[in-house]
Image (spheres, grey):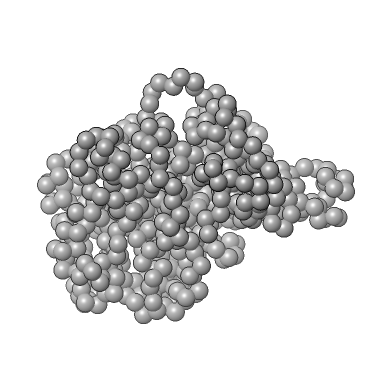
Amino acid sequence: MTAGIVAFGAYVPIYRMSTETLSQIWGKLMMPGEKAIANWDEDSLTMAVEAVVDCLGNIDRSIVDGLYFASTTPSYREKQNASIVAKVVDLRRDIATMDISNSIRSGTSAMRAALDAVNAGSAQNIMVASSDCRVPAPDSDFENYFGDGAAAILLGNTDVAVEIEGSYTMSSDFLDIWRRENDRYVRTWEDRFVFTQGYYQHMGEIIAELFNRYKVSNKDFDKVILYGHDQRRHFEMCRRLGFDLKTQVQDPLLTTVGNAGSASVLMMLVAALEAAKPGDRLLLAGYGDGADAYILKVTDKINGLRNRRGVKKHLARKMIMPSYGKYIHFRNLMEWQARPEPSNYAPLTMSWRDRNWILSFKGNKCNKCHGIQFPPQRICTWCQSKDDFEEIRLSDRKGIVYTYSMDNLAVSIDPPVVNTIVNLDGGGRVAAIMTDRDVNKISTGMPVELTFRRFHEGQGIHNYFWKCRPIID
């Protein structure tokens, strides 16, 4: 059987910023809606972890033979990000990892590479994680619609929920939106040239060629998933191609999530699959430095994937960014700070030694009394046996807040720092900072789950660890 989509998942940060807020700040009209804003302790890597975990669900992680990470905003430019994601989600070591970057088409490009690998027989299941956290220049057009998010799809040749009936790809050196090595913000050329000669031209060309090669037409598709630069251009693109805007065109998420760069099209795909029925045929097309297009056919295996959080459940839970000033702090857009953060960093030797519990959040289970402790220790806290433990993953366990405190004096981008002690389901107690929280709604006994986040930077190193947050579901 040819490769197809076995599972899917997505992640949308909890914070939203209304375009009305931006209109008030800059004194100009903007398209109505809101966009997702990554928390200050999130980036493309942490969001990719969230999407991969959502995609895997209860799937045995040992079946994954590779992980491809697609992003235009990787945490490291010369250090593979995919290998970090694979370690955090506790995949095998003997897998293929790859970063695919430098284009908003990198998500669908990674999908193509994964499909080719599975069809060639070099792997049976490959995870594609696409994530972006682009910082738009203040008071730019990009600030109106750039949003943050991630999507993940598992591609394999067994238990296929979405078959790949056809595909076509094309490359182009067209320069429309770009960012150089040392640029913080993306750049662009004059709108009319960018869209008439780039977006409209390339998307129209690849759809026409795909239709010609596979002898299909507009009426053959139940849902059409097309990359959209912004709401107006997406509407115009679909109109030019002759698709029914009310019944065929998938919501581009541009007024609820925003343009999430390389993750946009795959997030739209996840949203479409959440509502898809067996037998539905989908058209998927990504854009950037050319285009990728796919013909997809939904099978009855889709019914076994309804328990993902995906896009729908993440969109249902949100917190409004309280002010533009808070956003400025989250994105570190102010050069001056009255009280600078301390220069913290973890020595690489220590981080490497303790990587199993720092990244994969693995604790110890005593083989004699079955007590669980984190971080791992040589002596059991309960029965005092020595060096007689089983290593177990705790990152996917939920728990309840046993006690907590709020520290308003600690240096933090988002004060107060909420320190918690969490009792994990099945045993074990951990100390964790709470994130994605409303400080007015925290209480003992509240259910929480673990989430991988960025803690601080020092010596050019991103230091990540696990926090807790109120449960999304």
| Image position of 250 with respect to 142: above or below | below
Closer-to-camera residue (47/113):
47
Left or right: 76, with 272 as reference point: right
Q: In which quadrant of the rendered view does residue 298 lie? A: bottom left
Q: Position of residue 158 (x, y in %)?
A: 49, 74
Residue sitting nearer the eye, 424 or 394: 424
Residue 146: x and y in percent read 31, 45
Residue 131: x %, y % from top left: 41, 50
Residue, x 52% and y 25% (percent of image)? 341
Q: Give the residue drawn at x 52%, y 39%.
A: 454
Residue 335 seen in the figure: yes
Q: Is residue 87 visible?
A: no
Along the line of sight, the residue nearer the viewer: 396 or 247: 247
Q: Is residue 338 above or below residue 292?
A: above
Residue 340: image location, x then y, percent: 49, 22
Left or right side of 195 for 145:
right
At 26% from the left edge and 66% from the top edge, which residue is drawn? 249
Q: Classify residue 135 as left or right of residue 53.
A: left
Tag count: 0
Q: Does 444 appear above or below 227?
A: above
Quick one: quadrant of the N terminus?
bottom left
| Residue that protrudes farthest toward the front in the picture | 440
Residue depicted at x 34% and y 48%: 35
Query: Looking at the image, is 230 positioned above or below residue 407?
Result: below
